[in-house]
Amino acid sequence: MELRHLRYFVAAAEAENVSRAAVKLHLSQPALSRQIHDLEEELGFALFERTAKSIKLTEAGRAFLSDARDLLAKGDEAVHRAKAIATGSREELHIGYAPSPTVKLLPAALRAFQQRASGVRVKLHDLSSEEMLRGVREDKLALAILVRPTKANLRGLRFEELAKEGLCLAVPPNHPFAKIRSVPLAKAAAESFVVFNRADYPDYHEHLQALCASAGARLKIAEEHDSAASLLAAVEAGCGVALVNESMACIAGPRLKFVGISPRPEPLVIGVVWKLKAESEAAQQFVAAAKEAIKTAGAER
């Protein structure tokens, strides 16, 4: 069995049509069909159920598809790693992140990782939650560091908790709440909110709606924004208040006041997401380094 046989099989399985797969692979249909038949003969079982117009994976084929993808990913990783050594270049690890909840976590994790894997260059991508999940699924990102998505949004992905972050209200300095340390949830829920946009941050919306509902209020949205910077600017301009993580104070500085909520909402769970069965050695090292950095920071506090 050769890697090309696995590539042909995966392409045919994903296209569910030999003709379409052949076009994608720049092969003739008879040549691709022959290669797949050769693979089935070597394995000793059928991978596809065939009809005149389409093909469908057998139960054994479905099981083999997952492992075939893993083997191809490992093969590509081995080639990239060896090529990096041969050319003197460095391996790259692409990581998506959300700036506001990772503002304290990420620098310490990066420092710890570089001590473990100095030959790997980390490339960071500032993206929305939906963009990060899509990037991991499409293998454009090895990892993503973000607030824990819902179970539905984690389909086919793995999430591992790294830290928890408290929630508070961001208000302009002239707001009545700015003069108190904590505001009752019922009063907070009655305010108009500046929020992250629903399309890119659906879990944020669900969380905020549930919080308002628990106080018997309906969420009132003043504005939607696609970044932390624009959201904070809108709050500063008096457009509304915002529910944010406590680390947002590091970004905003003295421009805004950050007020607690009573009773305290459940904290955000921040962690790392990666594709099931597709974690590279560098990605494993990064997760281990992040845990080590957080543990050390906790001990120092």
Image (cartoon, helix red, strand yellow):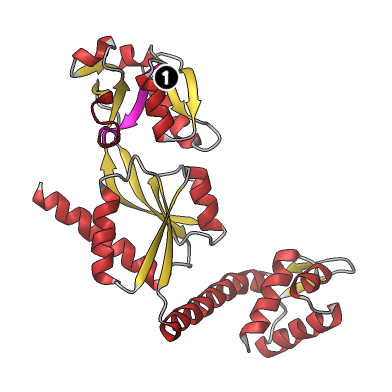
In the image, what residue occupies the spot 47% across and 30% down?
Answer: 205
Q: Magenta span has 247?
A: yes
In the image, what residue occupies the spot 74% across and 88% down?
Answer: 38
The quarter holding residue 242 reads: top left
Q: Quadrant of the N terminus?
A: bottom right
Element under disc 1: strand
Q: Of 52 and 248, which appears nearest the observer?
A: 248
Position of 59 relative to 171 (above/below): below
The reply, left or right, for residue 166 in relation to residue 224 is left
In the image, what residue occupies the spot 26% across and 13% down?
Answer: 177
The reply, left or right, for residue 172 in relation to residue 152 is left
Q: Of 298 and 67, which appears nearest the observer?
A: 298
- Report if residue 255 is visible in the image: yes
Q: Which residues are magenta?
A: 240-249
Mark 1 highlights which residue?
193
Whole-percent x, y for residue 102 in the image:
32, 45
The quarter holding residue 282 reads: bottom left
The amino acid sitting under disc 1 is Phe
